[in-house]
């Protein structure tokens, strides 16, 4: 049986490294206490101070516009809840109906047509990042002075992003304005109803997972409402 660590004693560096290694392997704090004899409070302290940890926070739906192109996005806030930065952060969404998994785009990262996957980012404590889960588009370009856009601007919802889609490109695919696209970078750059990331109208169960290098991630389940018209896009936490 592991000898109990002396209360108040300072941990050696090799003991700290062993605990960090066990945490990264997925060991629970109670298991680490059993294997090392270190107190539970010290294990939790090392976990807070030395292990990156991501958490999915609130969800929202916002209007985004750039030079007349507008879209409605379902977005999640992702926070680093530890005291260290989380590096190489990524997010995916799984559409339960098909089992397909798609990489998700981080808001604020420019999208290029060459991207086949999503870039990874760094998330610092106190500075949450935003993850695009889905996007819905209007049937045609809307003037920036349209009341819908002005209302969004007044409410502070409008943010600028390099949206590369051409609405004529979408219309040529006999799209009727219904449905949405999951937040895969390629689908956001050139939305096409032939893509696997296109979701027909209806309510779907989706699983969003976030992770980072050498740290803890998070996973949550949502109901995604793919709309008949772009303004009906919704994302709800499942009960």
Image (tube, rainbow, N blue to C red):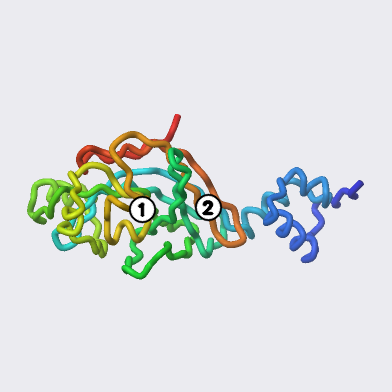
Report the quarter where the C terminus lies: top left
Q: Nearer the viewer, residue 231 or 155?
A: 231
Q: Is residue 131 left or right of residue 234?
A: right
Q: Residue furthest top?
A: 239
Residue 46, percent from left and from top: 68, 56
Mark 2–mark 1 distance (CA, rounded to whole Å):
19 Å
Q: Nearer the viewer, mark 2 or mark 1?
A: 1
Q: Residue at x 29, y 44 (%)?
A: 61
User: What residue sits right under mark 1 in the picture?
Assistant: 183
Q: Residue at x 43, y 63 (%)?
A: 117
Q: Which mark is residue 137?
A: none
Q: Nearer the viewer, residue 209 or 99?
A: 99
Q: Identify whether 112 is placed above or below 36.
A: below
Q: Residues within 10 Å of mark 2 (few under 14, many from 20)?
A: many
User: What residue sits right under mark 2 in the picture?
Assistant: 54
Residue 135, percent from left and from top: 29, 49
Residue 188, percent from left and from top: 30, 57
Q: Is residue 92 left or right of residue 63?
A: right
Disc 1 is placed on an element classified as: loop
Residue 53, percent from left and from top: 56, 53
Q: Residues within 10 Å of mark 1 (few under 14, many from 20)?
A: many
């Amino acid at each position: 049986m592991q000898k109990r660590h002396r209360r108040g004693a300072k941990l050696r560096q090799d003991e700290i490294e062993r605990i960090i290694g066990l945490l990264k392997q997925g060991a629970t704090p109670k298991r680490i206490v059993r294997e090392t004899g270190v107190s539970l409070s010290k294990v939790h302290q090392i976990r807070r101070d030395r292990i990156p940890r991501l958490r999915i926070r609130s969800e929202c739906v916002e209007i985004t516009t750039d030079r007349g192109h507008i879209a409605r996005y379902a977005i999640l806030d992702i926070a680093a809840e530890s005291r260290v930065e989380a590096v190489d952060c990524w997010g995916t969404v799984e559409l339960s109906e098909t089992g397909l998994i798609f990489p998700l785009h981080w808001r604020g990262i420019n999208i290029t047509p060459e991207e086949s996957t999503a870039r990874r980012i760094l998330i610092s404590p106190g500075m949450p990042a935003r993850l695009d889960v889905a996007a819905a588009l209007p049937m045609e370009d809307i003037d920036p002075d349209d009341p819908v856009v002005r209302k969004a601007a007044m409410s502070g919802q409008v943010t600028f992003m390099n949206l590369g889609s051409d609405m004529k490109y979408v219309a040529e695919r006999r799209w009727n304005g219904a449905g949405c696209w999951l937040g895969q970078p390629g689908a956001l750059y050139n939305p096409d109803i032939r893509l696997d990331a296109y979701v027909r109208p209806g309510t779907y169960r989706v699983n969003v997972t976030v992770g980072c290098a050498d740290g803890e991630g998070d996973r949550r389940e949502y109901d995604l409402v793919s709309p008949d018209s772009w303004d009906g896009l919704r994302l709800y936490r499942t009960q």
